[in-house]
Image (spheres, rainbow, N blue to C red):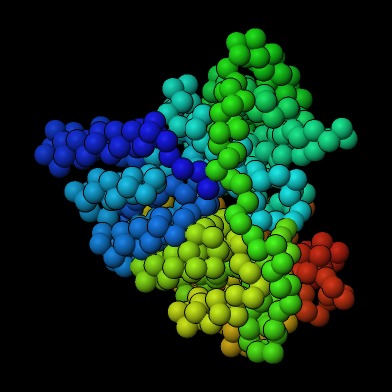
C-alpha cells in the first residue's frame, strides 16, 4: 500500500494545524457558522442532527493494521465506541465534539490518514475495487492509478470549488465491483488488441435525485495521458456545469443536456490543448507509486485444499470468500451485517480485532468495500478456519455476502439532517425477518439497498430491491423499486407503485421475494427473474 513521503506528511500536518486554528476561532466566536461551514466541510466535518460527524478518507479502501487500529482507538476516545463504514469506502464518526476534531485529525496524521476533501464541492475520495491486487480477473492492480488521481486531485486549485461534489471510481476488470458507471467519472483499466494498457472513461453517472448511468466517452486513453484526460473532463464540466441550481449541478446533467457526443467533442478539444501544455505527471512518479503496490511475499507452495468438515465454516467459506490470483489464497470478506445489526457499523473492539487479523493473516492489509464490509485480501486457505473461528467469536462471522441480509443502508433520519425517513430500523427488521423465516438461506444473490432520502447514499437505485424513504405529509413513507444493478450489467431500479409504511415495506420486500421464489428458473438470481418476467407479476402481488 502507498506510504507517505515527506511532502505528503507535511501537507497533512499543515492542514491539521490550520484546522485547529479555524476551530478555535469558531469556538471563540471569531468565525460565524456561515464562515466556518466551508472550512469544516473541506476537512470532512458535518453538523448533523445531534452532533458533528467526521468523515475520514480511506483512499481506494486500503488500510493497514495500524490504521484500522487507530480508527478503533478514535472511536473509543472521541466517539461512542463505534464507527460507521460507508458506501464511499470511508468511515464516519457520528458523535464528535468540535473542540476535539483537530485532535482526531492529528491522530489520523500519525498513521498517514486524513479527512481532506471528504466533503465540499471538490473531488472526493477515489474509490476502487476492494479486491484490487488480489483478484484473478483483473488486468492490473488499479490502485496505483487511483493513487495518482488522488495526488493530482488533492488541493487542485482549479477543482476545489466545482459546481457540485465529484466522485471517481477506478477498476481493472470486466467484473465491476465498485459501481463504476454510477460515478461522475468511472475509469476501467483495459488492455487493447496490441496488449497495451489504457483507460476507458465513463463520464456522467450518478444516483441521487436524477439517477443516470455513465456513457462511454473514450474507450482507450493511453495511461501516460490519464491525468491529462481526466483534467479535460473536469475542465469542460467546471466551465459549463450549473452553479445556479444545485439539483442540476452534477456532471451527469451536463452530459445529458449536451449529449454524450457533444460532451466528448468538447473534452477531446480541451484534451488536445492540454497535451500541448505537458501537464501529465512524469512517468517516473507513476513508477514510484507503483512500487508500493507490489505483491506481498505469497507462499509459493501454499496448500490449495480446504477442510470443509465443519458445516458452518463450509457455508461461510462458500459465501464470504473470493478467488485469489495466487494458488492457495483467497480474499475473505468480514460481514458488518449481523442479523438485526446496523449495516456498516463496527465497534472499537471489532476494529482492533480486524487490525490484529490483518496483521496475522493478510500481510498487514485490509480493505473497506463500498457495500459496507471489510476484506482481508490475502488469506492462506490453510489459515481460513482459524480466521473464521476468531471472527465468529467476535460477531463478525455472518455468512451473508451478497445475500438478502447483506443490506446497504445509509444512517438515515437517526443521524442525518438531510434524511426524510429512517433507514436503520428498516434494515434491521428485514434482516431479522429473513433470518427467522429461513428464506434467506434459499434466495441466493439478492442485493438490497436502503436510502433515507433522495440523495441515495444507500444506493437504492442500484438495488435488486431498493427502498427509498420519503416524507409524506409528515409521516415516513417507503418507496419500493426493483431491478437495479451496480455491477457490469448496470441498471436503475423502477418504482413498483405507491409507497408503504414501516411495517408495510418489510412485508412488501417479502412479497417480492415470494414472487421470485415462485417464478425463478434454475440458476436465476432475483435480478434475472425480474428481467425475464417484468414488473407486472410483482405489482399484482403487492397491490392486487
| In-image side of 15 versus 25 (left or right) | right
Give the residue at x 29% y 65%. Answer: 76
| In-image side of 518 versus 307 (left or right) | right
| Residue placed most toward the observer, 491 or 97 | 97
Give the residue at x 24% y 49%. Answer: 103
| In-image side of 477 versus 42 (left or right) | right
Give the residue at x 73% y 64%. Answer: 327
Whether residue 182 is visible to the viewer of this picture, yes or no, is no
Residue lying furthest left: 28
Residue 418: x and y in percent read 41, 51
* On screen, residue 74 above or below 314: above
| Residue placed most toward the observer, 214 or 480 | 214
* On screen, residue 479 above or below 118: below
| In-image side of 406 versus 352 (left or right) | right
Image quadrant where residue 234 sits: top right
State the count of labels. Answer: 0
Give the residue at x 49% y 32%. Answer: 151
Residue 298: x and y in percent read 64, 60
| Residue placed most toward the observer, 231 or 222 | 222
Image quadrant where residue 161 sits: top left
Residue 544: x and y in percent read 73, 75
Residue 452: x and y in percent read 49, 59
Whether residue 100 is visible to the viewer of this picture, yes or no, is yes
Amino acid at each position: 500500500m502507498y506510504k507517505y513521503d515527506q511532502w505528503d506528511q507535511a501537507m497533512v500536518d499543515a492542514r491539521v494545524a490550520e484546522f485547529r486554528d479555524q476551530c478555535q476561532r469558531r469556538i471563540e466566536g471569531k468565525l460565524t457558522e456561515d464562515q466556518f461551514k466551508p472550512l469544516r466541510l473541506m476537512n470532512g466535518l458535518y453538523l448533523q442532527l445531534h452532533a458533528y460527524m467526521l468523515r475520514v478518507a480511506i483512499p481506494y479502501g486500503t488500510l493497514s493494521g495500524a490504521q484500522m487500529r487507530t480508527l478503533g482507538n478514535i472511536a473509543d476516545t472521541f466517539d461512542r465506541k463505534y464507527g460507521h463504514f460507508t458506501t464511499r469506502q470511508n468511515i464516519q464518526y457520528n458523535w464528535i465534539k468540535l473542540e476535539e476534531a483537530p485532535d482526531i485529525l492529528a491522530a489520523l496524521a500519525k498513521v498517514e490518514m486524513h479527512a481532506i476533501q471528504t466533503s465540499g464541492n471538490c473531488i472526493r475520495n477515489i474509490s476502487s475495487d476492494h479486491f484490487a491486487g488480489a483478484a484473478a480477473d483483473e488486468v492490473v492492480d488499479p490502485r496505483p492509478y487511483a493513487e495518482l488521481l488522488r495526488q493530482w486531485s488533492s488541493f487542485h486549485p482549479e477543482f476545489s470549488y466545482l459546481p457540485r461534489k465529484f466522485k471517481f471510481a477506478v477498476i481493472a476488470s470486466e467484473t465491476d465491483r465498485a459501481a463504476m458507471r454510477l460515478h461522475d467519472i468511472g475509469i476501467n483499466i483495459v488492455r487493447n488488441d496490441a496488449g497495451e494498457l489504457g483507460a476507458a472513461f465513463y463520464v456522467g453517472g450518478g444516483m441521487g435525485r436524477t439517477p443516470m448511468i455513465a456513457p462511454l466517452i473514450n474507450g482507450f486513453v493511453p495511461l501516460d495521458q490519464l491525468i491529462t484526460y481526466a483534467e479535460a473532463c473536469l475542465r469542460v464540466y467546471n466551465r459549463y456545469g450549473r452553479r445556479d441550481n444545485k439539483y442540476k449541478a452534477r456532471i451527469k446533467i451536463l452530459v445529458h443536456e449536451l449529449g454524450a457526443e457533444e460532451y466528448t467533442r468538447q473534452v477531446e478539444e480541451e484534451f488536445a490543448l492540454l497535451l500541448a501544455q505537458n501537464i501529465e505527471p512524469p512517468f517516473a512518479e507513476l513508477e514510484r507509486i507503483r512500487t508500493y503496490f507490489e505483491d506481498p511475499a505469497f507462499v509459493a507452495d501454499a496448500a490449495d485444499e480446504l477442510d470443509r468438515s465443519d458445516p458452518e465454516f463450509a457455508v461461510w467459506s462458500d459465501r464470504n470468500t473470493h478467488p485469489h490470483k495466487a494458488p492457495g489464497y483467497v480474499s475473505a470478506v468480514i460481514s458488518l451485517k449481523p442479523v438485526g445489526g446496523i449495516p456498516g457499523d463496527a465497534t472499537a473492539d471489532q476494529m482492533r480485532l480486524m487490525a490484529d487479523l490483518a496483521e496475522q493473516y493478510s500481510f498487514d492489509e485490509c480493505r473497506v468495500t463500498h457495500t459496507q464490509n471489510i476484506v482481508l485480501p490475502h488469506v492462506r486457505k490453510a489459515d481460513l478456519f482459524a480466521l473464521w473461528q476468531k471472527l465468529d467469536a467476535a460477531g463478525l462471522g455472518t455468512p451473508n455476502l451478497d445475500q438478502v441480509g447483506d443490506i446497504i443502508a445509509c444512517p438515515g433520519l437517526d443521524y442525518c439532517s438531510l434524511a426524510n425517513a429512517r433507514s436503520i430500523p428498516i434494515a434491521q427488521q428485514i434482516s431479522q425477518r429473513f433470518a427467522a423465516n429461513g428464506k434467506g438461506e434459499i434466495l441466493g444473490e439478492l442485493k438490497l439497498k436502503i436510502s433515507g432520502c433522495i440523495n441515495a447514499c444507500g444506493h437504492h437505485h442500484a438495488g435488486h430491491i431498493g427502498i427509498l424513504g420519503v416524507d409524506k405529509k409528515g409521516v415516513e413513507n417507503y418507496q419500493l423499486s426493483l431491478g437495479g444493478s451496480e455491477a457490469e450489467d448496470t441498471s436503475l431500479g423502477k418504482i413498483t407503485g405507491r409507497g408503504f409504511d414501516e411495517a408495510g415495506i418489510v412485508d412488501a420486500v417479502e412479497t417480492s421475494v415470494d414472487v421470485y421464489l415462485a417464478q425463478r428458473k434454475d440458476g436465476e438470481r432475483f435480478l434475472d427473474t425480474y428481467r425475464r418476467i417484468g414488473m407486472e407479476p410483482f405489482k399484482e402481488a403487492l397491490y392486487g
